[in-house]
Amino acid sequence: MIPRIHKRGSETIGLIRYLYGPGTREEHTDPHLVAAFDPLTPDPGRDPRATYKQLQRLLDQPVNALPAGRRPKKHVWHLSVRASPEDPILSDDDWAAIARRMVAATGIAPDGDDDACRWAAVRHADDHIHIVATLVRDDGRRPRLHNEARRAQAEARLVEADYDLRRITPGDGTAAKRPTSAERHKAERRGRQRTPREELREAVRRSVAGAAGEEEFFERLAAAGLLVRRRIAPSGDTLGYTVALPGDRNGKGEPVFYSGSKLAPDLSLPRIRERWTRNPDDPTQQSSLPPTTGPASARRHATSAAWQALLVVDQGDDGVIAAQIAATGELLDALAQTSAAHTRHELQAAATVFERASRSHVRASRGHDHALRRAARDLVHSGPALGRGEDGATTAMAIDMLFFLITAAAHWHSRKQHAQQAEAAHRAAAHLRAAYPAAADRSMALLHQQGSRLAPSWQHHHATAVRQALPELADRILTEPGWPALAATLHEARTTGHDPAALLTRAAARRELDTAEHVSDVLVWRLRRMAGLPADTRNSQGRRTDGTFAVPAPGHSAQIGTRPPNSSPRRR
């Protein structure tokens, strides 16, 4: 159940006419009164003798009783209360009880207060009511409405429990501002799926992802096709900015501009500048390093940065964790805008949803998120990935690690009782889970083929290593569809000089392994990252990704020139 307090007005009669009228698109049906401050209040919807003017005079009487100089200019208070689409249709009696609870909770008409404000609740649809009140009490005083929006939300949570309705996660005031009904209707009239406010928010968010400074940020805004205005101080410094879509015009034909703070709390220029804060204790931030070259290399860098951030989210203090989570949003944005077509939709959905999880009342300690922001910058500057070969495989590797990082962020938000942020992080993780098969299927299929061609003695050897390193998970791993791919990876790691059992122990030292849907897949990507193996096995034929020569791919090494343990060399 969603209560919403609208802007205060100055004309009671205008709001009454709207509530009892047909609506802007003929959506109002059977408008009628369900409750009011006085049971004898006339209802223009059901009583043919009652008029809008009668209802207006009754509600405005305490206002008009005041001397002209003491009357508030904005005296009309308006609250709508809407049920969720999946909720059952409530009766008029139910809505009447809910209306009384809302006016009591907000301070309009506290229980037992005979001199409270006058109000009326109108129902013109199955799923919601509107409450109109005038902000002068019968005793001539003004009501105490401090934090009435928050109190309405708290009461709505109680109503949901009492009426067995869908539970809405409580907010904390850090969410981006929702589009107004006027903005939504304008978008619908023009056949747009999203409002300009939503499109601008996403465009600005993508433009700031990994940006190294203010000028680069504004250059990206212009490159995205946005109209940009800067607010310049007499000194020449930029104080703020506004953006508009070229095709979004008002009634006068002028572009409709939005400031960054109107798009989201963390998109104001001062808050964006905080992202460029340097950490003096980190020597890597003191020099300007060239970006990683190539999409695959950038994705490996992103995977490593996400791994380090995961350690911080597990063990760091709250301010540093908040910075890592905020920068994770930038990394997701960068990965989404540089991904191939077959993964882009789910990754963009993950980035859009995670935006809500990137903000809370815990102030981020900026400067500690350099690695993630640098990884986002490398992704943007390395260009779009092709979606196949090493590009596609390293995308799968990055998605796999980001899944665990975002899951850890969800757990942290849950511990802090950040309900909306935790829910958003879980939804983002679900989108990553959906994106993973599209990125990983081809590479995992090749690894599966190579692992299936390993000699039985090698398969037994690697299974023994799994049982020794991961005794509690071994039975599960060895029966998963991805086991042959893991066996191939263990074999390739061994042929490049690594101890497979030691790698397995290190790779499984993270608690997040227990949340994996397929443990063998997770281990494949972790081992290949830790051992420096190419993400796509077709790259194993020439060089490793660090530039050194690699041995033949494991599928071939099992057949050519590599002996299984305890076997004799073949005679030529």
Image: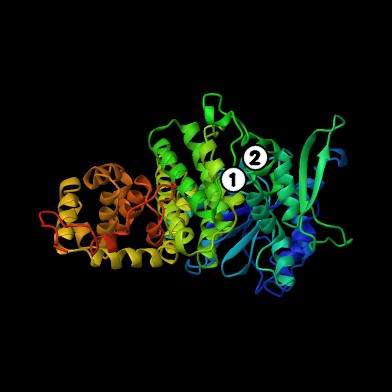
Q: Are marks 1 and 2 in contact (CB under 8 Å)?
A: yes
Mark 2 lies on residue:
212
Asked if residue 498 is positioned above or below residue 559 in the image, the reply reads above
Name of the residue lying farthest toward the top: 281
Q: Position of residue 478 (x, y in %)?
A: 20, 59
Q: Earlier in the sequence, mark 1 or mark 2?
A: 2
Asked if residue 173 is positioned above or below residue 129 in the image, the reply reads above
The one of 162 and 37 positioned closer to us in this rendering: 162
Q: Position of residue 258 (x, y in %)?
A: 75, 50
Q: CA distance from mark 1 to mark 2?
A: 8 Å
Quadrant of residue 227 within the rendered picture: bottom right
Query: Label 2 crowding class (10 Å Cα cut-off): few <14, some 14-19, many 20+?
Result: some
Mark 1 lies on residue:
377
The quarter in which the C terminus is drawn is: bottom left
The one of 307 and 484 positioned closer to us in this rendering: 484
Q: Position of residue 368 (x, y in %)?
A: 52, 32
The one of 480 and 554 positioned closer to us in this rendering: 554
Identity of the residue drawn at 26% across and 60% down = 557
Callout 2 amino acid: Ala
Identity of the residue drawn at 66% across and 44% down = 267
Callout 1 amino acid: Arg
Asked if residue 276 is positioned above or below residue 389 in the image, the reply reads above
Res 166 seen here = no
Q: Position of residue 550 (x, y in %)?
A: 36, 52
Q: Which mark is residue 425?
A: none
The one of 176 and 73 positioned closer to us in this rendering: 176
Query: Label 1 crowding class (10 Å Cα cut-off): few <14, some 14-19, many 20+?
Result: many
Q: Secondary structure at mark 1?
A: helix
Q: Secondary structure at mark 2?
A: loop
Name of the residue lying farthest toward the front: 572
